Image (cartoon, grey):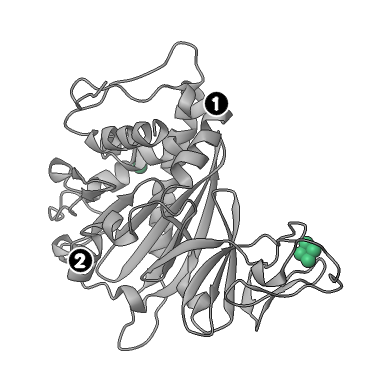
Amino acid sequence: MSSSLANGRTIPSHWYTDSAVLHTEIDKIFRRTWQPAGYVDKVSRPGEYLACEVAGEPVAIVRGNDGVLRGFSNVCRHRASIILEGHGCAKSLRCPYHAWTYGLDGKLLVAPEFEGVEDWDLKQVSLPPVRVAVWGPFVFVNIDGQAPPLAEVMGDIPAQVAELGCPIDQLHFSYRRDYLIDCNWKVYVDNYLEGYHLPAAHPSLFRELDYNQYRVDTFRYYSSQYAPIRPPRPGRDEPRRYSREDAGNRALYFWIFPNFMLNVYPDNLSSNIILPVGHDKTLTIFEWFTYPRNGQASEIAADTVEFSDEIQQEDIKICENVQKGLRSSTYDRGRYSVKRENGVFHFHRLVEEFLSR
Ligand code: FES
Ligand SMILES: [Fe+2]
């Protein structure tokens, strides 16, 4: 049944509270989309590698001697040990269990004391490839190999980010803060995708923004939020975080299905990665990148991080409350504000689309 925003219902509450649904989502959403997996500066030179886990799969990202960035299953073909940990630089990829050694191209080179094994050919053994793509500082991985190209998924985002003046290939990583939240990952994403909760839940942020102009625009696999800073009215609403000068500054907010957010400002970019840890536990990773100033790397201002933290604490409380409410036998599905919740509607329809494939 197709639905419009005006007659649509939110997704059923058990999709947020049932661990079996999360397992299906890992399979049908997280394995089938581009997932942020690490930073390209860790794997810029030949031999540099990065181990990560994407949708439950151990993955190794390796820069070859030919300069090509490749992804592999990080699982040894012998008896399934994890091969690489963390990041580093190596001439070959050596399993710590029995020292099977693979080339930077994933092909098995050495298997000690393996003579006499029948129906087995060292030359036929290699680590299964995993699809990787790079944008700016981010390395993305697509486990099932079937997602549309990253550039297609991101649509107009790179052009808009460039237009704002963000030098996406020269960003300096400055700071990371993690939050573990007692809610389903979709509760957090739902909350991010609407400004409807600003007046009641974020009084300090509400004072800074022009709520009447706040708008969410949806595209095939992403949405953007338009949230202009409101010029202060002298003598009437001090103190304000942002000044009159900031009011002219543009900012871009993007969410890319299912779990990656980008917040782009005239002098910094931050990413939020939303990772399900369990059906009712979510890790959110906030990272800040600065732009080079006069050729120098700079650090993110402490008050920028603190203001973000204040908003995040307000959102955490809301999200944990919602998770409790979703467990209630009295609630199943809700309705959307046509004016304010088109972004949530868009997300829910994408979730339905992927789960029904
Ligand atoms: S599991 Fe890797 S060498 Fe045995
Ligand atoms: Fe919020």
Nearer-the-camera pick, 162 or 226: 162
Residue 127 visible at all: yes
First of labels 2, 1 by sequence position: 1
Front residue of 101/256: it is 101
Amino acid at circle 1: Asp
Extreme-front residue of the structure = 119
Residue tagged 2 = 159
Which residue shows up at 71% across the image and 71% down it?
Answer: 122
Query: At 33% across and 53% down in the image, what residue appears?
Result: 148
Within the image, what quadrant is residue 89 found in? bottom right
Residue kind at label 2, given as amino acid type = Ala
Which residue is identified by label 1?
18
Where does the image place residue 98, in percent across and percent down from the top left? 82, 68
The reply, left or right, for residue 129 in relation to residue 231 is right
240 over 322 or under it: above or below: below
Tell me if mark 2 has few (under 14), some (14-19) or many (20+) residues whose alpha carbon lies within 10 angstroms of its own.
Answer: few
Q: Secondary structure at mark 2?
A: helix
Q: Is residue 337 left or right of residue 204?
A: left
Q: Position of residue 178 (x, y in %)?
A: 53, 54
